[in-house]
Image: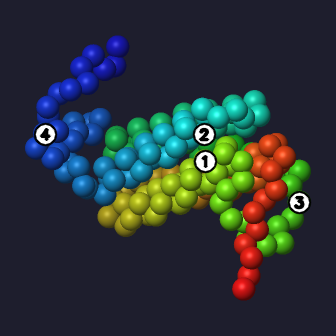
Amino acid sequence: MRLSKITTRTGDDGNTGLADGTRLPKNHPRITVIGSVDELNSQLGVLLAETLPEEVRAELLRIQNDLFDLGGVLAVPGAPFAAKKLVQLDAAIAHYNTGLPPLKEFILPGGSRAAALCHVARSVARRTERDYLQLMQSATIPSEGLHYLNRLSDLLFVLCRVLNRAAGQQEMLWQRE
C-alpha cells in the first residue's frame, strides 16, 4: 500500500513534499510543472471516458502511464526519463498520420466531442511544455521530458484528426478574411 492516508495536513502551510522529502512552496516552478502534468493526464482521462477506437484508447492509456512516470521524475530530482518513450511517440505520430490527407489550411479545435476533448488535451500539453521549459531554466531536469511533451502535443493534434474521421466528422477549417 503506497497511500494509506490522503489528508496529512502537512500542506496546510502552503508547502508540499517531493518524493525525496524536500519541501517546496506550492507555487514553486517544479510544483507548477507537476500540476500541469497531472492536469494533462486528467484531461486524457476525460477523453478516455468517450467512445474511442480501441487502438487510440490503448495509445492514450500508455501515454497516461508515461505522464505518471514524468511526474515521478519531477518529484524525484535527478531521476531520468526514458528516451524510449519519445521513440514510441514518434512511431505513433507516423502511424496515425499515414492515413490522413495533407493539411491545406489550419484546423479549428472542435468537430466530434472526442476530437474537441483531444484538442483541449493538446493545448494543455502545450502549456505543460512551456511550464517544463520554465523549470529547465532554473533546475536540472531531463530534456527528454521537454521533447516528450512537444511530441505529445503533435500526436494529440494528429489524434484529433483521426477521431474526427472515425466519427465521420468534417474538420473545421480556419476561414481567412
Q: Nearer the viewer, mark 3 or mark 2?
A: 2
Mark sitting earlier along the chain (1/2): 2
The image shows residue 6 at horizontal and vertical percentages of 26, 24
Q: In the figure, residue 66 lies in which quadrant?
A: top right
Q: State the SS at label 2.
A: helix
Q: Can you say which quadrant of the picture contains the C terminus?
A: bottom right
The amino acid sitting under disc 1 is Leu
Q: Can you identify the residue that label 1 sits on?
A: 117
Q: Nearer the viewer, mark 1 or mark 4?
A: 1
Mark sitting earlier along the chain (4/2): 4
Q: State the SS at label 1.
A: helix
CB within 8 Å, label 1 to label 3: no
CB within 8 Å, label 1 to label 4: no
Q: Can you identify the residue that label 3 sits on?
A: 101
Is disc 1 surrounded by few (<14), some (14 to 19) or many (20+) residues within 10 Å? many
CB within 8 Å, label 3 to label 4: no
The image shows residue 28 at horizontal and vertical percentages of 25, 55
Q: Mark yes or no: residue 123 visible.
A: yes
The mark found on residue 12 in the picture is: 4
Q: Is residue 58 above or below residue 135?
A: above
User: Residue at left 89%, top 50%?
Assistant: 99
The amino acid sitting under disc 3 is Pro
The mark found on residue 47 in the picture is: 2
The image shows residue 70 at horizontal and vertical percentages of 47, 43
User: Residue at left 76%, top 53%?
Assistant: 161
Q: State the SS at label 3.
A: loop
